[in-house]
Image: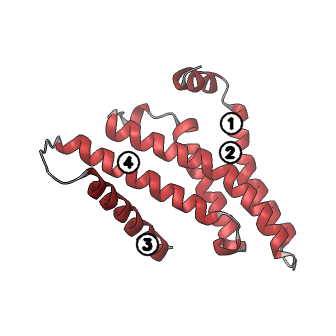
Amino acid sequence: MTLSQLFLSISENPWPLVLYFVAIPLAAWLVGIVATGSRDVRFWSYIYAVLIYAISLPGVFAVTLNVYLFLFERQSIWQANIILQFLPVVSMAITLMLIKSKIPFSLIPGFGKISGFLTLITALIGIMWLLDRIHLVSFTYVPFSAILIGFVLTLLAIRFAWSKLF
C-alpha cells in the first residue's frame, strides 16, 4: 500500500481518523480535570506524555507533509485535504495548549525528544528547500567532513535557539 492509496482510503472513510483527532484533545482536557489538585505529578506526567506522543507524531507528520506538498510539489492550498493535512496540526496545537496549561513541559518525560525531532525535521526541510531553490553547483576542495561538521553545528544552533524560544 502506498501513501496515495492510504490517503485515498482515509478520504473515503474519514470518521475513524476524525474521531481520533477529536478524542486526544478531549482526553487531555478530561485528564486535566481529573488531575486538578492531585499531588501525584509523576503519574499524570506519564499520562500526558502518552497523549503528547499520540498526537505529536501524526501532527509532525502532517506539518512535514504540508511543507513538502506546498514547497516542493507546489500544491495549491485549495487542493489541501482538511482531514489529513490540517486536522492533525490543529488537534496537536489544541492538545499541547491544554497540557501546557496544566503542567510544564519540562515535567513530561521525553518531551525534549519530540522537540529535538521537530528541530531536526525543520532543519532538514529547510536545507532541502534551500538546495532545491538555489541550484548551486560548486567545485570545492572543502572535505566532506567539514561540511558534515557545519551541518551538525547548524543543527545545534537551531536546537539552542529553539530551547530559548520556548
Q: Name the secondary structure under disc 3.
A: helix
Q: Helix, strand, or loop for circle 1?
A: helix
Mark 4 or mark 2, which is nearer the start of the sequence? Answer: 2
Q: CA distance from mark 3 to mark 2?
A: 31 Å
Callout 1 crowding tier (Cα within 10 Å): few <14, some 14–19, many ≥20: some
Q: Secondary structure at mark 2?
A: helix
Mark closer to the chain start, 1 or 3: 1
Amino acid type shown at disc 4: Ile
Badge 2 amino acid: Phe
Q: Are marks 1 and 4 in contact (CB under 8 Å)?
A: no
Q: Are marks 2 and 1 in contact (CB under 8 Å)?
A: yes
* Residue picked out by circle 3: 160
Q: Which-is-in-front pick, marks 1 and 4?
A: 4
Label 2 and label 1: CA atoms lie apart by 6 Å
Identity of the amino acid at label 1? Leu
Residue marked by disc 1: 17
* Disc number lying in front (3 or 2): 3
Residue wearing tag 4: 125
**Percent of width and height locating residue 107:** 70, 74
Residue at 33 percent of width and 55 percent of height: 148
| Residue 145: mark | none
Relative depth, front residue between 161 and 14: 161
Task: State the image coordinates of residue 102 (x, y, percent, origin top left).
Answer: 72, 73
Q: Between tags 2 and 4, which lies in front?
A: 4
Q: Relative to 115, does residue 8 appear above or below in the rendering?
A: above
Question: Which residue has dot 2 on it?
Answer: 21
Instruction: Specify which label sits upstream in the sequence, 3 or 4.
Output: 4
